[in-house]
Amino acid sequence: MAVNKLDQAAQEAGIALSFLSNKGVSESISDETKRALLAIMDTPAGKAPPLPPVQVLRGEDAPPLVPQGSGSYRWTLETEQGESFSGSVKCGEPIALPAGLAEGYHQLALHKGQQRWQTRVIVAPARCYLPPQLEKEKRWGALVQLYTLRSQHNWGIGDFGDLLQMVEHVAAQGGDFVGLNPLHALYPAQPWHTSPYSPSSRRWLNVLYIDVSQVAAFQQSEAGQSWWQSAPVRRALKQARASDWVDYPAVAELKLTALRFAWQAFQPAAEKTPAFQQFLAEGGEHLRYQAAFDAILAERSQQRSDEWGWEKWPEGWRNAHQPEVQQWCAQHEAEIQFWSWLQWLAQQQFSACWQRSQQLGMAVGLYRDLAVGVAQHSAETWQDPQLYKLKASVGAPPDPLGPLGQNWGLPPLDPHVMRERGYQPFIDLLRANMRDCGALRIDHVMSLLRLWWIPYGEGADKGAYVSYPVHDLLAILALESQRQRCMVIGEDLGTVPQEIVGLLRDHGIFSWKVLFFEQQDNRYRLPEAYPHQSIASASTHDLPTMTAFWNEDDLALRQQLGQFDKRSMLNAARKQRARERAALLEAMKQAGSGRSLRAVSADQAMTPAISQAIHHFLASTGSALLGLQPEDWLGMEKPVNVPGTVDEYPNWRRKIRVPLEKMFTYKKVQALLKVVNEGRQGR
């Protein structure tokens, strides 16, 4: 059957003409959607260069580099290691690259007369890095939403000082890592935008995680210490610490005020501080514009507190490279330096946590989380609008849980622009997030293969899948993983295309196995069914806690929030949950994790014995890594996030019930972690 011109153009742009629904039925994409996405992509037409802008080589089966066009070319190759090679080649014949080209980033140039074309040649390894200890051993760690941590010294939000404590406590209990929520930069001048999965930038850190008490310049500031000891500040601090929910506006006001005092003390020495100057030089233009964005947002928020995103700024300010912005930056160098300094402080403190984990002998130590994208009107899109398609957003197609589909409000990265730039934006992103950690979790790892693009203003059901150069991206991921000695975990939950499952496994990327999902035909998979190349957990930040799952607190909350249209839907969910509890109980008994549960009924409320049995079951799985949530150690019921809600529930704010100083002294926590250690060691 002949393909019409519209379909041909869509396929050439990477737009899928259909998709397989979760029912296994092929659904066609409408012509209106194809036209809308083609207009959004606006791929420029022109004469193709003799070679692509980038070529990724991996293994012996790598495709040859064959120049197109007519006649002959002279070629030169400059390797990353500083070697030079040259030769000549006829069109249609492969370039004879030197044998055994080292892994890395090399520059190939073609010459014909006065014309010159550049191609980046990337040579990548076969697999991502794996710590030697994990080749055969099994380790566990804590999965922590950093902002939820309480302590006697923090300022109402978990910070890098708390993370340092957490690393030490987990290591002392036999754990190997602390897994974290995305630490990406948010909007310090508009702290009510709290989701770590809708960041302002994925390359910089959330400065509200700075532990101000560790900042020497704050201790040295007489004005800062006077402010700090004042009665109103002490009351505000006490209230922020005591709250069961993070009060982001109160925390931001306290921390940014304190850090302003600290900056006044540090500023005279800024130019004479080599480490800070080196940080500025390495951050370059990207750091400068991130700081400028934060500074302009802070200035405008004082005047218009309800203004959200650069879209509402005057037209001459909606792009970092416009003359008005450049003039403002030239006149506000000190302000840009201040916000850059905050990034330096955050990086220093996070790095100290990583160094401590290595001193303690943790094989993984810290793992970071890479969100799938940035918010529509963020610092990233402001300073590099060509990289993002701002007239589209990404999400998910319709399914039974979301009949209208999902729209995440995140503009997609343009795969064509990434390729034109030799994948440098992707490389920079990986390097920023693999820094100072032993593992990187990639949220919605399927985005390396495809993303569901939705034309701006349309419903999620009017979208289509757009493909990404998955083989190239996975090869670069393996190269950076090996260089940074950082293993990779792929969040592959939900509908996973079959074509990427094998690719992830072959590239050494760990799969995610969530207990609640590891069931089939009302039976839970037994521990031996979990592959070694995976991380197991009971739950995630988007799912109920272990206690809430067992006691059906999550169903009661969803009913309260109006997520069940009819009473019959709630009753059906409760019946299904009862079956799941009974099946889990049976699986634990089969696996030998439920010896103490012989008299326990599936209708019984959560007890320490049931919690220990579930933890032992998870610890016995074949997964090399096991991630545990402190909420489950403490029997907490409230979730940190309820998907599908915005204002209905205070997402990303709920704190851990007890402070860090007490958590690991509880006998029930110590007993539970002892069970986990025994399960991991096969006892």
Image (cartoon, rainbow, N blue to C red):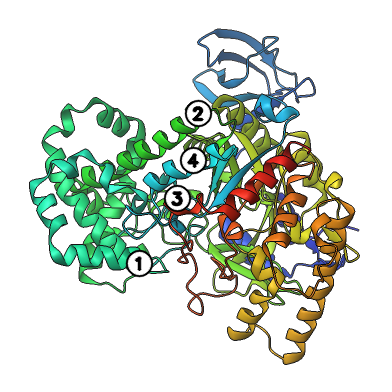
Q: Say which label, 4 or 3, has the lower sequence index.
A: 4
Give the quadrant of the C terminus: top right
Horizontal placement of 146 versus 478: left or right?
Answer: left
How crowded is the residue under tag 2: few (<14 C-alpha within 10 Å), some, or many (20+)? some
- Looking at the image, which is closer to me, 160 or 3? 160
CB atoms at circles 4 and 2 under 8 Å apart?
no
Whole-angstrom CA distance, mark 4 to mark 3, is 20 Å
Say above or below: 647 vs 246.
below
Amino acid bearing label 4 = Val
Q: Nearer the viewer, mark 2 or mark 3?
A: 2
Residue at 37% of width from left, 68% of height from top?
192
CB atoms at circles 4 and 3 under 8 Å apart?
no
Q: Can you tell which quarter of the image residue 621 is in?
A: top right
- Looking at the image, which is closer to me, 39 or 121? 121
Q: Secondary structure at mark 4?
A: helix
Query: What residue is pinned by disc 2?
Result: 358
Query: What residue is pinned by disc 1?
Result: 242
Q: Is residue 424 visible?
A: yes
Query: What residue is pinned by disc 3?
Result: 184
Q: Position of residue 58 (x, y in %)?
A: 72, 25
Whole-angstrom CA distance, mark 1 to mark 4, is 23 Å
Q: Nearer the viewer, mark 2 or mark 1?
A: 1
